[in-house]
Image: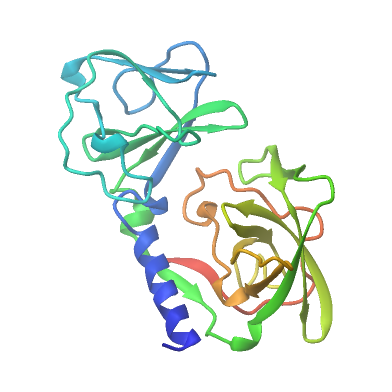
């Protein structure tokens, strides 16, 4: 299989993943929670959140049920496991913990999250307009010249946190681990990246951002070898979740990650009917 074939499989998989019943297109709300129990629009029960997690109090008649097997990650389909409805108070673990919980109510998937110590509840609705009207993701044609060698250098004193604007209008911390160095059209460039498991990830913009492409994009690089060598493939630059739903809080590019060149590779924009 050629690199172009692998890329085509990747683009097809991306389109399939975002359009699943409870994928990123289905996110209709992110409710930030405080310690005082409160009702949430369109949902049963009373909700609150603190350092221990998210708490919900509901009656069995409300039909609010835990998702069996600790739940499917947001983006999957709620499994058909029938759990007893919540009758009383239940403490839910957010997505930042290994034992993360999920709930379902009717066709909705409810996902407790935590960001920088702040708890919230996300609501994924298969009937969301952005999902039902989804018509695909526009992409640039595959071009091998946009896949280049890169060298990763970690920061001397370990990971850092930089403050960047986020899609929700707030400044938030972004953990970064080092920089990658590479060349495009003979010119040297660097990007600041984060670590995600063994892989590296980055938030970037370029001369196409906000015109031919969404205002910023994400990249993922394979794990670097012992000498820091990896590959930066802009053909797989992809749209952030907030391109699919305004209720995500994606980070903007950190300083130095705004390329002056036009990167005409990767995903461009979301199409709707």
Q: Which quadrant holds the N terminus?
A: bottom left
Horizontal side of 170 relative to 38 (left or right) equals right
The answer to whether residue 272 is seen in the rendering is no
Quadrant of res 132: bottom left
User: 83 or 229: which is nearer to us?
Assistant: 229
Horizontal side of 72 relative to 247 (left or right) equals left
Above or below, comparing residue 58 to residue 94 in the picture: above
User: 72 or 128: which is nearer to us?
Assistant: 72
The answer to whether residue 267 is seen in the rendering is yes
Above or below, comparing residue 2 to residue 219 in the picture: below
Question: Which residue lies at the image location 39% right of the left edge and 59% below the top edge?
Answer: 18
Question: Which residue lies at the image location 49% right of the left edge and 18% below the top edge?
Answer: 52
Q: Position of residue 207 (x, y in %)?
A: 73, 72
Outermost residue to the front: 226
Question: Which residue lies at the image location 34% right of the left edge and 65% below the top edge?
Answer: 16
Quadrant of res 168: top right
Q: Which quadrant holds the C terminus?
A: bottom left
């Amino acid at each position: 299989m050629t690199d172009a074939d692998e890329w085509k499989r990747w683009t097809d998989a991306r389109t399939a993943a975002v359009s699943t019943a409870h994928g990123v297109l289905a996110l209709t709300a992110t409710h930030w929670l405080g310690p005082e129990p409160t009702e949430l629009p369109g949902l049963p029960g009373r909700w609150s959140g603190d350092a221990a997690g998210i708490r919900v109090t509901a009656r069995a008649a409300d039909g609010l049920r835990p998702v069996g097997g600790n739940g499917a990650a947001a983006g999957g389909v709620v499994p058909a496991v029938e759990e007893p409805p919540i009758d009383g108070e239940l403490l839910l673990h957010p997505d930042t913990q290994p034992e993360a919980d999920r709930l379902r109510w009717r066709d909705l998937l409810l996902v407790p999250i935590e960001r920088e110590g702040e708890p919230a509840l996300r609501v994924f609705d298969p009937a969301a307009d952005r999902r039902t009207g989804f018509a695909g993701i526009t992409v640039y044609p595959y071009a091998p010249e946009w896949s280049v060698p890169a060298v990763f250098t970690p920061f001397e004193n370990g990971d850092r946190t930089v403050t960047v604007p986020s899609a929700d209008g707030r400044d938030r911390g972004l953990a970064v681990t080092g920089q990658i160095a590479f060349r495009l059209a003979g010119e040297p460039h660097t990007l600041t990246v984060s670590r995600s498991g063994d892989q590296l990830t980055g938030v970037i913009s370029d001369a196409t951002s906000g015109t031919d492409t969404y205002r910023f994009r994400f990249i993922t690089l394979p794990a670097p070898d012992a000498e820091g060598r990896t590959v930066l493939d802009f053909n797989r630059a992809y749209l952030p979740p907030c391109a699919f739903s305004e209720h995500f809080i994606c980070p903007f590019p950190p300083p130095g990650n705004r390329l002056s060149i036009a990167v005409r590779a990767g995903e461009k924009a979301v199409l709707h009917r």
